[in-house]
Amino acid sequence: MPQFTIPSTLLPADGRFGCGPSKVRAEQLDYLATGGAQLLGTSHRQAQVKDLVGRVRSGLAQLFRLPDGYEVVLGNGGSTAFWDAASFGLIERRAENLSFGEFGSKFAQAAGAPWLKAPKVITAEGGSRSEVEILDGIDVYAWPQNETSTGVQAPVTRVAADALTVIDATSAAGGIDFEANQADVYYFAPQKNFASDGGLWFALLSPAAIERVEALHADADRYIPEFLSIKNALDNSRLNQTLNTPAISTLLLMESQTEWINANGGLTWADARTKESSSVLYEWATASKYATPFVINPDHRSQVVVTIDFDDSIDAAAIARTLRENGIVDTEPYRKLGRNQLRVATFVAIEPDDVRALVASIEYVVDHL
């Protein structure tokens, strides 16, 4: 039984606000049941599954307004697999990595592979972001568009240098508008705004990125494991397949979500929706007597992952625990930050009115704890 019950009139219609695997819409689950009945347990080399992969690739090309010459590529694994794949087949000699949270730091670690020159890593304190420094000898500039761990957002702007601009978009893709021609590689896993499952990574590759991938693959001195070969992923994607069996459920959920976003107005609509939801939280926290946005600079605040600090007199862990007991789940802070805060996803599947109800529920809990 809950310690106390939040009135049903205050509760959101859907209490899922997690920043890991995200809220999945009921319509996606219905599509998974119907589409999956035909595809789950069938060969991924046959037309039905390849058609599904093709539809997902086409839907993403539409959503991201893909420039001429860019290609949608997918591969087995998630973002972690892509970081290692980049160290083998995307970074030629040395990368510069911006590290202002968990995802940026992990890519920087992968870029420190022994066959590469040690990366230039530019860090920033939690709740802020670092900026690019153009240096000689750098052939990849990489940073997260959105840091899921801290709620910090960074612009997607091409670096004016003879190098590739590589963007980790795992928690941003599908929820934050940008121009695809500002990046050479825009990669993501689909568990956030695409409300899908794990098992795959996706990337938008520019002609320059494709040229780099093919050149490194052809280099006899460069060892690239088959599973971590971006060239293999590129070749298979052109055939609407993956090297190994793809996660069919992931593809079905993603197809449904991509179609939903495109039908409602595409990336422009999704961007406006996540801005509305996140603004509800930021405006409330700014006006609150006991809460404040963790990210001080408004220009650095994420519109898809909101982190709110609480005064020491308020136990944020108790708030999260009480919310969970009442069906409002996954508002706990990122474990490694160790702050007295809540972290709330405002991904595109989350209704802005549910965010408003979340605020009302938090206020009720604080008043009654």
Image (cartoon, rainbow, N blue to C red):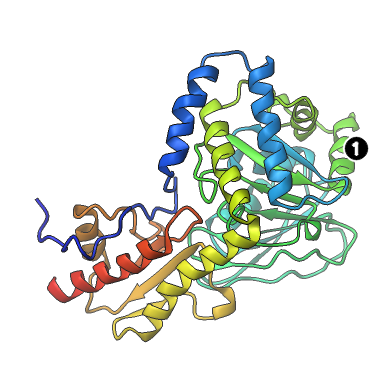
Q: Is residue 211 left or right of residue 79?
A: right
| Above or below, comparing residue 106 to residue 269 in the picture | above
Amino acid residing under circle 1: Ala
Task: Give the residue at x 22% y 79%.
Answer: 313
Residue 80: give x, y in percent of width and height.
Answer: 59, 42
Task: Give the residue at x 82% y 68%.
Answer: 134
| Above or below, comparing residue 262 to residue 130 in the picture | above
Residue 272: give x, y in percent of width and height.
Answer: 57, 66
- Residue identified by numbered label 1: 215
| Above or below, comparing residue 252 to residue 133 in the picture | above
Q: Is residue 271 left or right of residue 136?
A: left
| Quadrant in the picture for residue 86 | top right
Q: Is residue 48 left or right of residue 34?
A: right
Task: Give the residue at x 54% y 79%.
Answer: 298
Residue 351: give x, y in percent of width and height.
Answer: 42, 59
Q: Is any part of residue 225 visible from this angle?
A: yes
| The C terminus sits in image quarter | bottom left
Q: Is residue 126 left or right of residue 58?
A: left
Residue 97: give x, y in percent of width and height.
Answer: 69, 59
> Are there few (<14), some (14-19), or many (20+) residues within 10 Å of tag 1?
some
In this view, the residue in front, 204 or 354, is: 354
| Above or below, comparing residue 135 to residue 262 in the picture | below
In this view, the residue in front, 274 or 264, is: 264
